[in-house]
Image: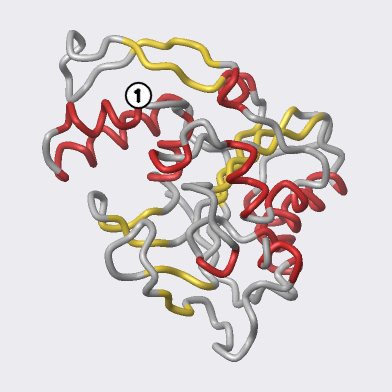
Amino acid sequence: MHRVLIEPADYQSCRPAVEKAFSLFAPPIAGKRVLVKPNVLRAARPEEAVTTHPAVLRAVVECLLDLGAGGITVGDNPGLMGYGANEKSFERAGLIEASLGHYRNIGLDAVEVPFSVLGDVAAMPKVSVSRAVLEAEVFLSLPKFKTHGLTVITGAVKNSYGILPGAQKALLHKLSGSPERFQEVVVDVFRLRPPDFVIVDAILGMQGNGPASTDLRWVAACSPRTTPWPWTRSSAA
C-alpha cells in the first residue's frame, strides 16, 4: 500500500515540508546517484504554473546535498513546444539556478529499451529512454499538479512521460488514437522505470484545459495573497 503525505506549504518556506517528505518516504540517499526530474513542459516563467516551481526543486536539491547524495542530476525532456530547447526551458522556469549546479540536458544521451503500444509489440517495439534515468540509483520525480486534456490530471504517473526524449512522445500520442488508450500508454512508460520517491508541487495548481492553461488555482493550504514566485530575476526572464 502506498502512503501519501499532504503537507501545507508555500513557495517562500517549503523546505520544512520537503524535509518531512524525505524523512517519511525517501529511500537511502547517502552515496547514491540521484536523478531529479521536475515537470518542464516548455519554456515558461514560474508564475505560469506550467512547470515545477524552482523553490520546490531547490529545497529538494538542498535536502539531497545534506543527506550526502553521491551525485545529483536534475533534468527532463520538454514536450512538443520545448523540443530542442532543453536549456532554454529550464532557464526560463528558474530551474537551472534552483538546481544549484546540477542541471544536465538528459535528452542528449538515450538508450533503446523494449516497448509495446497497448500490447502490440509491432507498432513500436522500442523506445529511447534518457540514460540518466535508467542508470540512477534513486529516481526522484517532481511533478506539477495540473490538469491535462488527455489524462485529466498530470501528476506522479504522467510526469514519467518525460523520461522519453524527443518527438517519440508525439508519435506515441498518434499511435494511441484516443485519450483512453493514451492513458494506458502513459502507464506503460511509467513502468519502464518507476520513481523511487515522488514530491508533487501542489501549492499553485492548474485547472481548465491543461497542461498549459492560464486558469490557475491555489491548492495546498497556501494563502492566495502569498506570492508564488519568490525570485524576481527568474520571474522576469
Q: Which percent across, then down, holds residue 86?
A: 58, 36
Q: Which percent across, then down, holds residue 223?
A: 58, 88
Residue under label 1, please give it: 168
147 or 9, nearer to the observer: 147
**Measured along the vertical axis of the image, is residue 154 above or below residue 118?**
below
Q: Residue at x 24, y 34 (%)?
A: 173
Quadrant housing the C terminus: bottom right
Structure colour scheme? secondary structure
Q: Residue at x 79, y 45 (%)?
A: 64
Q: Which percent across, then down, holds residue 128?
A: 44, 17
Determine crowd level at label 1: few under 14, some 14-19, many 20+ residues with C-alpha closer than 10 A.
Answer: some
Q: Which percent across, then down, holds residue 189?
A: 36, 29
Q: Secondary structure at mark 1?
A: helix
**Measured along the vertical axis of the image, is residue 182 above or below residue 226?**
above
**Measured along the vertical axis of the image, is residue 56 above or below residue 107?**
below
Q: Residue at x 64, y 86 (%)?
A: 226
Q: Is residue 195 left or right of residue 135?
A: left
Q: Amino acid at mark 1?
A: Gln
19 or 50, nearer to the observer: 50
The number of numbered badges drawn on the structure is 1
**Measured along the vertical axis of the image, is residue 177 above or below residue 113?**
below
Residue with the most extreme front position? 237
193 or 91, nearer to the observer: 91
Q: Is residue 18 left or right of residue 153?
A: right
Q: Residue at x 46, y 34 (%)?
A: 83
Q: Quadrant of residue 93?
A: bottom right
Q: Is residue 235 left or right of residue 51?
A: right
